[in-house]
Amino acid sequence: MIGVVYNYVIPAIHVFACLFLIVVVLLQTGKGADMGAVFGGGSQTLFGSGGAGNFLTKLTAGTAIAFMVTSLILTYGASRNPSSGLLRRLPSSAAEPAPATAPEAGGEPSPPPAAEAPVETPPAEAPPAGQQ
């Protein structure tokens, strides 16, 4: 049940809060701008007698809080130890790194492994001039 919440519900709320926050911020006016210019003069009746400032400010703050909380929850969920046992399924020899070739105490360093000589392939014979 917790996996469903982390994988589906919280990301859906996060995306919705993100998109809604963008819309709410774009609806707000800048300093000195008039809401009448955006909505064609009907801002007083659209948002009530107090105008849009107080309502949109509270809506922006609430949406921003929801966005930050879902961001923290998603970050915490992503930083937990992985639940997959894939690394535990690997054979122990594959999980350990190969030892480096170092010279033995008092001895000479071991030579590097010999590279295999490339195998030469014979060139393809061309058919006689009369045959194709």
Image (tube, rainbow, N blue to C red):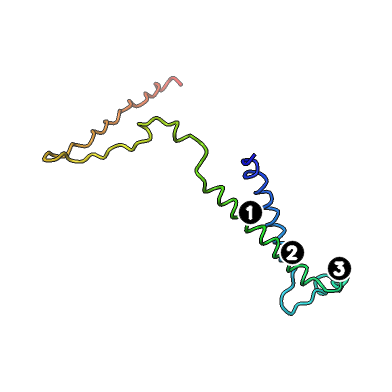
The residue tagged 1 is 70
Which circle marks residue 23 in the picture?
none
**Where, quadrant-wise, is the N terminus in this rendering?**
top right
Which amino acid type is shown beneath numbered disc 3? Leu
Q: Is residue 22 above or below residue 129?
A: below
Between discs 3 and 1, the one toward the N terminus = 3
Q: Would you say 102 lies left or right of 2 here?
A: left
Quarter occupied by residue 36: bottom right
Describe the element under mark 2 as helix, strand or loop: helix
In 3D space, how far apart are the residues under numbered discs 3 and 2 (Cα atoms)? 15 Å
Which circle marks residue 46 in the picture?
3
Residue nearest the viewer, comparing 7 with 127: 7
In 3D space, how far apart are the residues under numbered discs 2 and 1 (Cα atoms)? 17 Å
Q: Residues within 10 Å of mark 2 (few under 14, many from 20)?
A: some
Q: Residue at x 65, y 41 (%)?
A: 4
Residue 130 in the image, given as x and y percentages of width and height? 43, 20
Residue nearest the viewer, comparing 39 with 119: 39
